[in-house]
Image (tube, rainbow, N blue to C red):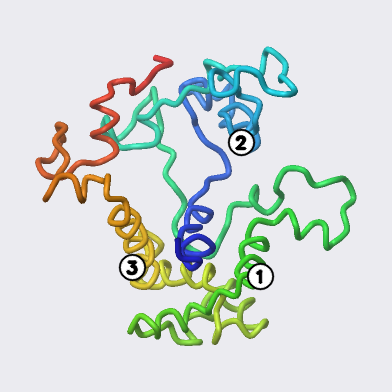
């Protein structure tokens, strides 16, 4: 897997993360009695913290409390809130639109869990996700966004284009508008070319070719086993199968009713 993909281009999702989520009808109902689920609560109650055990690890070395061993019923996803399955929303659900692909990261990801009280400046930086991403790029010697573009035969953003906006001004102060860290360049490119709605030419090529290479490298994949394979499940638009179509096919769109 290319380092440019793993440590930069595929970290595009960090820019898309919201501060809070209306996970299902339990959260942020019409009467406003319960707020949206925060990122901290999402990690704790949806399996990423290690507290959710279930059948995946029935006998962990240190069993969590019984109340934390199973997925709470009020944290089951209402898929209508995450994919456009049933129109424009209404009184019973609202959409959790992702944030744009741009150089700005939600505040919750600037203070990751685990930071002790009264940390030093060095300790505080360790719990800032953008800092970790940028440091990782330096550690493994990623090329700049401009160098990757040139290697791909693409015209890179100019220093003036990188330096636009408050984030660009900060990058310029550090001299990063001419040799831009790849992860930051991926987000800046998406903002510049498409207003943050999709990746720019360099990053989209890296992501698409990496996935294609992974599938092509697996001789058990559909690419090798079935020539000219296309999805066969029903879809709202013939010949165009989306995640929303897959959720409709499964049928468990709103488990909490």
* Residue pointed to by mark 3: 205
> Going by the picture, which residue comes out furthest to the front?
219
Query: In the image, is residue 31 above or below residue 198?
Result: above
Q: Nearer the viewer, residue 229 or 26?
A: 229
Labels 3, 2: front one:
3
Query: Which quadrant would the C terminus be assigned to in this image?
Result: top left
Answer with left or right where residue 118 lies relative to residue 225. right
Question: Residue 11: x and y, percent?
Answer: 51, 57
What whole-number distance in Å separates the C-alpha atoms at marks 3 and 2?
33 Å
Q: Nearer the viewer, residue 227 or 64?
A: 227
Answer with left or right where residue 182 lies relative to residue 226. right
* Residue pointed to by mark 1: 139
Please report whichever mark, 3 or 1, sits nearer to the chain's N-terminal start.
1
Answer with left or right where residue 245 lies relative to residue 171. left
* Residue pointed to by mark 2: 38
What whole-number distance in Å separates the C-alpha atoms at marks 3 and 1?
24 Å
């Amino acid at each position: 897997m290319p380092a440019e993909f793993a440590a930069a281009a595929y970290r595009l999702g960090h820019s898309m993360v919201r501060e809070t989520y209306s996970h299902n009808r339990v959260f942020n109902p019409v009467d406003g009695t319960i707020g949206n689920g925060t990122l901290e609560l999402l990690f704790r109650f949806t399996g990423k913290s290690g507290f959710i055990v279930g059948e995946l690890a029935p006998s962990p070395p240190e069993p969590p409390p019984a109340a934390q061993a199973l997925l709470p019923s009020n944290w089951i996803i209402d898929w209508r809130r995450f994919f456009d399955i049933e129109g424009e929303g209404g009184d019973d659900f609202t959409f959790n639109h992702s944030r744009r692909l741009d150089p700005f990261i939600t505040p919750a990801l600037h203070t990751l869990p685990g930071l002790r009280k009264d940390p030093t400046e060095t300790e505080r930086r360790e719990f800032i996700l953008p800092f970790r991403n940028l440091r990782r790029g330096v550690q493994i010697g990623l090329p700049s966004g401009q160098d990757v573009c040139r290697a791909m035969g693409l015209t890179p953003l100019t220093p003036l284009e990188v330096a636009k906006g408050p984030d660009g001004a900060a990058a310029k102060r550090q001299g990063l508008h001419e040799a831009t860290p790849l992860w930051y360049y991926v987000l800046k490119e998406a903002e510049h070319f498409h207003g943050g709605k999709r990746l720019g030419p360099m990053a989209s090529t890296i992501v698409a070719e990496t996935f294609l290479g992974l599938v092509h490298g697996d001789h058990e994949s559909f690419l090798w086993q079935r020539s000219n394979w296309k999805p066969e499940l029903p879809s709202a638009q013939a010949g165009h199968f989306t995640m929303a179509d897959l959720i409709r096919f499964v049928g468990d769109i709103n488990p909490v009713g």
